[in-house]
Amino acid sequence: MVTYEELHGATGNFNQENLIGSGSFGSVYKGCLREGIEVAVKVLDIRKTASLKSFLAECEALRSTRHRNLVKLITSCSSIDFKNMEFLASVYEYLSNGSLEDWIKGKRKNANGDGLNIVDRLNVAIDVACGLDYLHHDCEVAVAHCDLKPSNILLDRDMTAKIGDFGLAKLLIERTGNNDLSSTNVLKGSIGYMPPEYGFGQKPSTAGDAYSFGVVLLELFTGKSPTHENFTGDQNLIRWVQSAFPENIVQVLDSELLHLMQHLPNEGQINIIPEAEPSPDGRIGLRDALCKLETARQTLFEHTHV
């Protein structure tokens, strides 16, 4: 749908100044197509054997999905570059406010120097929950994202959050009444966000995404990554939050939020601090999580008149 030559020109010859990110399977460049459309071009590293599987998984997962909280795949390119080498790329809408990870870590801030306030974070959480709920319940074939984390959640100019990077996504299909996969490839998730059962060989599931979402929510409200240096041995992000909940919850909240917490009623506090349940059977689904988050936001609005 788009040629290598067009992408080469749109990104300034894949100039390092236009490099906006890199991951396991390739690099992402900001570009501008002839129509003036800003795009993010994800160029696959074909030297890595898993990159083709990632490319195909992403195309398959996004081929028939349409939702305001999913990064839009505009087109793809399978071609030959100027060195006569195979070239694979996916072209996405460009989201100008970067990743949620950048905001949590303070690499990005609002024009007034502030980070994300509590309403911003609730809005992001609800956006992500909406996107996951759609993937799990409203697609023709349910999709498990399998790699949800702040670096894969992007923000547009209006701060609407969108889920990106479907390179590990799996289509869940029904076989003999049980959830199974269209692929049995070994799962490669991200340390800290991957649910415990995946480590024991269980197949990807919507419950696995629910665990990852719980960890993302904890990070969103505490500012601490699950791989933070403080979490060693038996201590981890989940246990750290649980040890403070509910009496000492202020001690684990991101300092950016503390000045707002005095306006937040106890009921709202309890509803927005989630737990990433280790057992998949004990986790609530994304539709229930979405309902709880929306209730928390409504409670917040009623008590603070934000």
Image: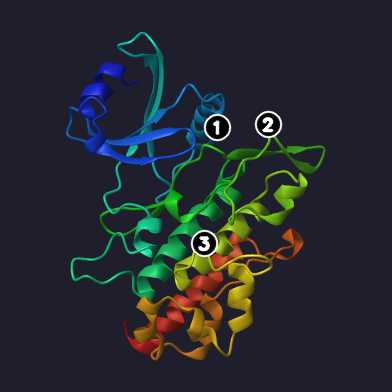
Indicate whether 149 appears above or below 28: below
Q: Which mark is residue 216?
A: 3
Label 2 or label 3, whichever comes before in sequence order: 2
Mark 1 burial class by Cα count in 10 Å: few <14, some 14-19, many 20+: some
Number of numbered discs visible in the structure rendering: 3
Q: Which mark is residue 57?
A: 1
Label 1 or label 3, whichever comes before in sequence order: 1
Q: Is residue 301 left or right of residue 188?
A: left
Q: Where residue 115 sits in the image (x, y, percent)? A: 30, 69
Distance in Å between CA atoms under marks 1 and 3: 23 Å
Distance in Å between CA atoms under marks 1 and 2: 10 Å
Quadrant position of the C terminus in the picture:
bottom left
State if disc 2 and disc 1 touch (CB < 8 Å): yes
Q: Residue at x 35, y 61 (%)?
A: 103
Distance in Å between CA atoms under marks 2 and 3: 26 Å
Q: Is residue 116 visible?
A: yes
Q: Is residue 98 left or right of residue 145?
A: left
Q: Is residue 142 left or right of residue 114?
A: right
User: Which of the two marks, 2 or 3, is nearer to us in this view?
Assistant: 3
Q: Residue at x 46, y 90 (%)?
A: 265
Q: Using the rendered view, name the quadrant where residue 238 is placed.
A: bottom right
- For the rendered model, the colour scheme is rainbow
Q: Amino acid at mark 2?
A: Ser
Indicate whether 267 appears above or below 190: below
Q: Which mark is residue 183?
A: 2
Q: Where residue 254 sits in the image (x, y, percent)? A: 42, 75
